[in-house]
Amino acid sequence: MTGGDTSSMPTIAEAGEETFAAAEANGAPAVSLEGVHKSFGDLEVLRGIDLSVAPHEVICLIGSSGSGKSTLLRCVNLLEPINRGRILLWGHDVTSPGVDENAVRRHIGIVFQSFNLFPHMTVLRNITLGPIRVLGVSRAEAEDCARALLERFGLSEKQNDYPDRLSGGQQQRVAIVRALAMQPGIMLLDEVTSALDPELVGEVLGVIGELASAGMTMLIATHEMSFARDIADRVCFLDEGVILEQGPPKQVFTSPVNLRTQQFLRRIVDAGRL
Amino acid sequence: MRGSREGAYLDGQTLLAAGAPPPGSLGGSGKGSRLLGGKRAATVSTASTVVFIGVVVVLFVFAPGAAAVRHTFFNPQQMWQAFRGDPRLGLFSVGKGLILNVEMFLIAEVLILIWALVIAVLRQLRNPVLFPFRMLAVFYTDVFRGVPLIIVIFAIGFGAPALYLRVISTQSDFVYGIAALVLSYSAYVAEVYRAGINSVHQSQVAAARSLGLSQWKSLRFVVLPQALRTVIPPLLNDFISLQKDTALVSTLGAVIEANRAAQIDSSTLFVYSSYTVAALLFLCITIPLARFTDHLIARDVGRRMAGGGAIR
């Protein structure tokens, strides 16, 4: 499953905290994309993405709708197979044939725009499903862990509710807790506030901010520019499937070099979003 | 023109003020009755029902052959005798036959629910190792949905014993009947399941898979529980027709249910009242099932209208 130079390392299936730490000591990036191409039929959505995410780094992907942000995240999580290039997680090529995608995914947390909670399960069951059925953790232990996480994010009293009883903001926070319960090495956030009423955005961004300060490695696709400016270590501007510009938020937001980035940011400023 | 409308309007007002008028008086009040939309609808539907029943009764009572029909199909004494059966005359009880019918139906139903689910799930799994099974499942549903149930019953009921195999060829007609029902109905029910599975949004699968759940576990813990809720009303619908079709097993010559008893009654006495008994007994089962299905559908619609969309 792992080729040549990485054969001495544990496979991604066995990876745990130690592997993440070992990879970090090696200086291996948490995620690295090398010349990733992705097409849906004739539509080329990603046209050669090179990106490397260091451990504990928070990267925000910005760009207009259809620029490929979501697709990029879905490719990292192997929800979409890529056409060309490769993706490495902690130094392991996860796009080579024969990789156990379920084993890869358990180390990657993803949160979707539309929450995607399981409507037939209580909040607690939503959170414990993965740990119990994938990690093989006992129910008692999984529930203890879930309750601790709910407590931390102020959702304790919602644990026995079904998702439809929750506000959008609460649902999205539960979705984040559900991903965290798998103890992932990286979190992918796909426009997690886009489906929320404006007054509910703050509580979700607060949770993400807390994760960032706890050192979680994150790759965040977002339209919230002021949030990106505050939280990101690095901002990448995607346009038509390529990263046109990247750098520290201060640099990208205040003195963008690329013309397209300038145009995009001007539109955002004009719309009063920055 | 204007004047006449005004008049009609006033007319209606007077009618309203006078309280509920006898239905007959509304007919003469012309446009004024438009004001009484709700009451008028009730009146019309009542009248239409009365007229309809009247026509049916007239046809039944005054038709040239009415007396003969009543004697043949609605002879109370014969109906009672058919229901109880009469061993001395070698008559089978339609009532007892129905109990056997219900037994078959219940056993077949449980087996169908399980077998159809296996087929539906096989069709759904994309694991390359399971490819031949997936093809078999497709073939199975195609064949058994295409072949009439009566032919499946003949094929199994007469074919299986002819094989002279140790276990397969020595079963009773009761067992062959159930086997045929299960084989045929499972093909339909598998398709109902499949529609339910496909009705669960793809984002639910993405959420499950992203947690690291395998395809099978996603199906088992996330998709199927949601799918099964949505297919309960159509499944009940299929079981209403299964309950009736159980009667077709009588063609095997098994003396096991209502229709068979009816056949013997009619062939010895040339009276078909036993068929009427059988039909009425079937209705006693299928009508409550149908109302229960309606109830479930209404509840489902109500829930969706409430905006919750919660499936529990």
Image (tube, rainbow, N blue to C red):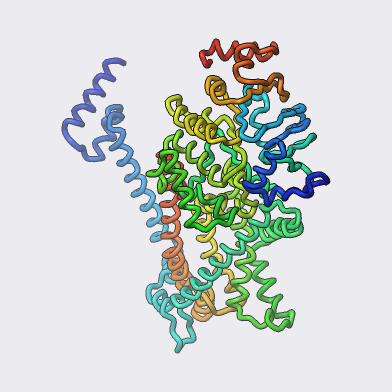
In the image, residue B102 lies at what x, y percent?
Answer: 48, 71
Q: On the picture, is A88 further left or further right than B88?
A: right
Toward the right, the furthest residue is: A4
Report whether residue B231 is seen: no
Q: Count the marks.
A: 0
Q: Position of residue B33 (x, y in %)?
A: 28, 31
Question: Does B133 appear above or below B88?
Answer: above
Report the residue that reaches farthest toward the left. B18
Q: Nearer the viewer, residue B97 or A127?
A: A127
Instruction: Give me the residue at 50% from left, 78% from top.
Output: B265
Which of the 4 image quarters holds residue A35?
top right
| Pick the front one: B298 or A69 | A69
> Front-most of B178 and A167?
A167
Location of residue B8 with respect to A167 vertically, above or below = above
Residue lying at 61% horizontally and 52% vertically, measured from the top left: B194
Give left or right: position of B27 versus A57: left
Residue B279 on image: x %, y %: 47, 66
Is A240 left or right of B57, judged from the image as shown? right
In this picture, residue A114 sits left or right of residue A83: left
Is B250 drawn above or below residue A36 in the view shown? below
- Looking at the rendering, which quadrant does residue A76 occupy? top right
Instruction: Confirm whether residue B115 shows in the render.
Output: yes
Among all residues in the image, which is located at the extreme front?
Answer: A25
Which residue occupies 68% across, 76% down? B158
Residue A107: percent from the left, percent from the top? 63, 45
